[in-house]
Amino acid sequence: MIKTEEKAMALTHTILVTIATEPHTGYEIWKNFEETLNCFWKASQQQIYRELGKMEQKGLVNSEMIFQQGRPNKKLYSITEQGKIELEKWISFPSEPTVIREDLLVKIRAGSLVNPEIILQELKHRRQIHQETLTRYQQKEKDYLKNIDSLTPSDYCLYLTLKRGIIYENEWIEWCDEALEYFSSLKLDS
């Protein structure tokens, strides 16, 4: 069983993975989260910068100030030897499924207590969000598939996480469709 402290450090480890192969600024790390990691991990800029400060204090990352003329200076973060050891230790622990806390499922559980139209609107809204996300992921997948035979191991690992995100979004859409069908039939019966 993984200790609670090790589970709680997942943001730290996600950042370490991001900078394991090359140094990045805090902004670049955040952009990486937004553009490539968002199918399985979300973090705000503020969370990332706060975590980077903690990681530097623990000796997991180093930072170097890059002075720029005409633009703000930037801080470049790189993983330390201690950070690599921590990352390898964390990767070696078995992972457990994430606890689900999904308010839509609570609303569906209470669906018999309200007018079906209320639930239908919520389901339509959620389905649209998942469809938009799926469309974005599928576009990214097309980019990967163009070069699938020449992907680096790092890129292929990222592609595998994207595929899981696509499956996740598809499952949500299928579930929303089933729930929409059910609540639509309740509306007709009313």
Image (spheres, rainbow, N blue to C red):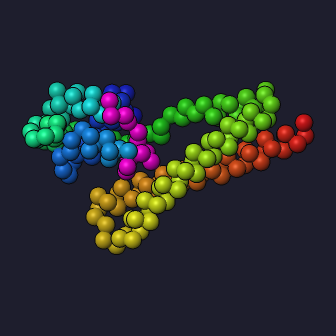
Residue 36 lies in the magenta-colored region: yes
From the top left corner, tell me how far across and down residue 141 is, in percent: 44, 62
Q: Residue furthest front?
A: 70
The residue segment tinted magenta is: 35-46
Quadrant in which the N terminus is drawn: top left
- Identity of the residue drawn at 39% across and 71% down: 146
Residue occupying image coordinates x 29% and y 62%: 153
Compare residues 2 and 189 and report the one nearer the observer.
Answer: 189
Q: Is residue 79 left or right of residue 133?
A: left
Relative vertical location of residue 49 with respect to residue 152 in this rendering, above or below: above
Split into 4 quadrants, where in the image is the C terminus?
Answer: top right
Query: Percent x, y for residue 49?
Result: 27, 31
Q: Is residue 114 magenta?
A: no
Relative height, residue 76 to residue 132 (above, below): above
Whether residue 37 appears in this view of the structure is yes
The residue shown at (80%, 44%) is 184
Q: Position of residue 92 (x, y in %)?
A: 30, 44
Residue 79 visible, this orientation: no
Kindly indicate the quadrant of the structure image that contains residue 72. top left
